[in-house]
Amino acid sequence: MSSLPATDDDDDDDEDYDEDYEVEKDDGALPSPKPTRWSLHSSCKRPPDVGGRLSMKILDERLSQRVDSMMQAGLVDELLDFHHRYNQQRIKSNTSPDYTKGIFQSIGFKEFHDYLILPEEERASIKAEALFKRGLDDLKMVTKRYANNQQKWIKNRLMRRADRQVPPLYVLDCTDLAQWKSNVFDKAVSIISAILQGEKPEEKPINENIENQKNTDSSNEMQRYCEVCDRIFIGELQWNAHINGLKHKKILRRMRRMEKQNPEIKSS
């Protein structure tokens, strides 16, 4: 469950998070839906997303606590073990070490890289202690940055875009963990139960204005097919965004160039 910030963020730059979700930047088509913990998967035409809201300060504190709990659960020992086995295989295959690709680019490996490559006899040194602390601080910083990117992605993709087919988004207050059952769990169950029964939930989606805008615009239900790209688009906004996008124009230029070089392609 992603947590939404309590304050607005006018930064529309969600490029970093788009890369993780393989979103095309040049048209209005959505990528394949990505599962979320609280997304309702059912026969509903457009299942809702239910998430939590809390302040950035509290979110940062919880993320720091999460990293600390990961450390207590043996994260560094796990990294060291994997690092050791990786080097054993590398030596057997007679290949040079490369910590800039693959799994070593995952959160955790990069941040503790300098600590992991220390000789075992130096891991109790002052230098090792400093490298360990720096790795821990970097891991917390990267975790918070990733959470911030998630927030931007949710806001820009689900709350600010009338040109996308998005589900209703319900946000619940998860600031006080002592009130989790009444403020979050019970309300989430109520929302999902209402939708499963074909009823309207008491809670209002935070993107309701966008939903109303779509419902009052009949052009949003119109389907268009792009023969050039072999794709279907729903709504005038998605269609216009696509035909004016770089990808569509690039494919169109390539097809026209091939037709000029091979006239029989056009005739067939």
Image (cartoon, rainbow, N blue to C red):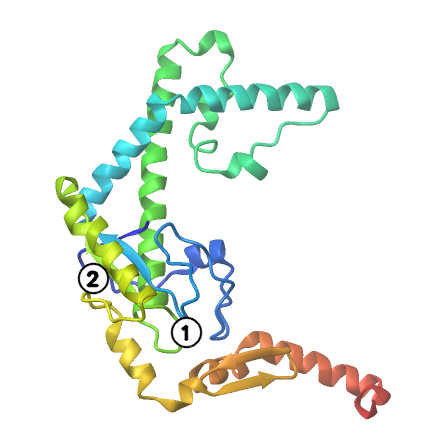
Q: How many marks?
A: 2
Residue beneath the point at 32% across and 58% down: 152
State whether residue 1 is above or below residue 30: above
Quadrant location of the C terminus in the rendered image: bottom right
Horizontally, residue 19 falls left or right of residue 263, namely: left
Indicate the position of residue 124 as horizontal and vertical percent values.
39, 9
At mark 1, the secondary structure is loop
Residue furthest toward the front? 197
Q: Nearer the viewer, mark 1 or mark 2?
A: 1
Q: Residues within 10 Å of mark 1 (few under 14, many from 20)?
A: some
Residue furthest toward the bottom? 267
Q: Nearer the viewer, residue 134 or 24?
A: 24
State whether residue 231 is above or below residue 118: below
Marked residue nearer the N-terminal end (1 or 2): 2
Q: Which residue is mark 1?
A: 165
Q: Which residue is mark 2?
A: 8
Query: Label 2 amino acid?
Result: Asp
At mark 2, the secondary structure is loop
Q: Residue 207 sits in which quadrant? A: bottom left
Query: Is residue 54 among what the camera can see?
Result: no
Indicate the position of residue 231 as horizontal and vertical percent values.
59, 77
State whether residue 44 is above or below residue 236: above
State whether residue 29 is above or below residue 213: above
Indicate the position of residue 176 as horizontal and vertical percent values.
13, 43
